[in-house]
Amino acid sequence: MAELVFFSGTMDSGKSTLALQTDHNHRARGRQGLIFTRDDRAGVARLSSRLGLEVQAREVDDDTDFWEVIGAERRQGHLVDYLVCDEAQFYSPEQVEQLARLVDENEIDVFAFGITADFRTRLFPGSARLVELADRIEVLQVQSLCWCGARATHNARTVDGVMVVEGDQVVVGDVAAGADVAYEVLCRRHHMRRMTADAARRLAPASDTMLDVR
Ligand SMILES: [Zn+2]
């Protein structure tokens, strides 16, 4: 039975690395797959991991119809056994439904990788639909850590070094509209307190006593 599996995690949880590993494992078994991504840091139609691995992928945009794309592949006689779908949080709910249909009607395994919630702690629409439809959800437990040492469970956005909790859901890249936009993973406690590593450092006493803003 084919499956729709959603591998979810925070930004530094190693999702793209696992996406590449998953593709490798299935390919090594002689299965045919396609890799999709959207807005990867490495550029259009690339899937990259923070460990430096990078492969060619198909870029998803608003107009991508997975049902059509895979249908066209099959009509050309290409076998498609599985799909690796990275940055799935950026896919639309409709695109996630197309993926589920490919699983059910064409017996294609779909391995989707994505961040669950945005910097405001709200679900991305694509991730919400994946949570609703997936046969299985795997929460990646790669130990990405908050600056305090606790497990990082939330994504924070900083603009010019200051944590923000409002703004567009998707801002990709390092510089947007002249501002320096960056992301940092935090534990929930420090996300709620808007305490990034920088902010914590600024609060630290001048003496060398242990920082304790927990
Ligand atoms: Zn923390």
Image (cartoon, rainbow, N blue to C red):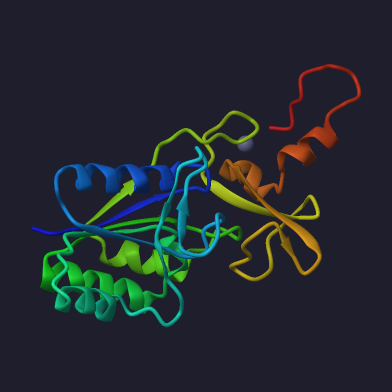
| Identity of the residue furthest to the front in this view | 76
Comparing 73 with 104, the one in front is 73
Would residue 204 be found to the left or right of residue 214 on screen?
right
Location of ligand 1 given as a quarter of the image: top right
Q: Nearer the viewer, residue 70 or 104?
A: 70
Specify the quadrant that holds the N terminus.
Answer: bottom left
Outermost residue, left side: 1
For residue 137, above or below residue 120 = above
**Image coordinates for residue 211, horizontal then vertical, percent:** 76, 25
Q: Is residue 73 above or below residue 180?
A: below
Q: How many marks?
A: 0
| Residue at screen point 68% across, 61% down | 165
Whether residue 77 sits left or right of residue 139 in the image: it is left
Q: Nearer the viewer, residue 159 or 38?
A: 38
Q: Position of residue 64 (x, y in %)?
A: 38, 78
Q: Residue sitting at 77 percent across and 39 percent down? A: 198
Of residues 136 and 89, the one drawn nearer to the viewer in this rendering: 89
- Residue 96 as seen in the image, left or right of residue 122: left
For image coordinates 74% across by 32% down, the residue present is 213
Looking at this view, name the residue that lies furthest to the top. 208
Residue 209 point in image, percent of width and height = 82, 17
State which quarter of the image contains the C terminus: top right
Residue 153 in picture, x, y percent from top left: 51, 44
Q: Is residue 113 above or below residue 52?
A: below
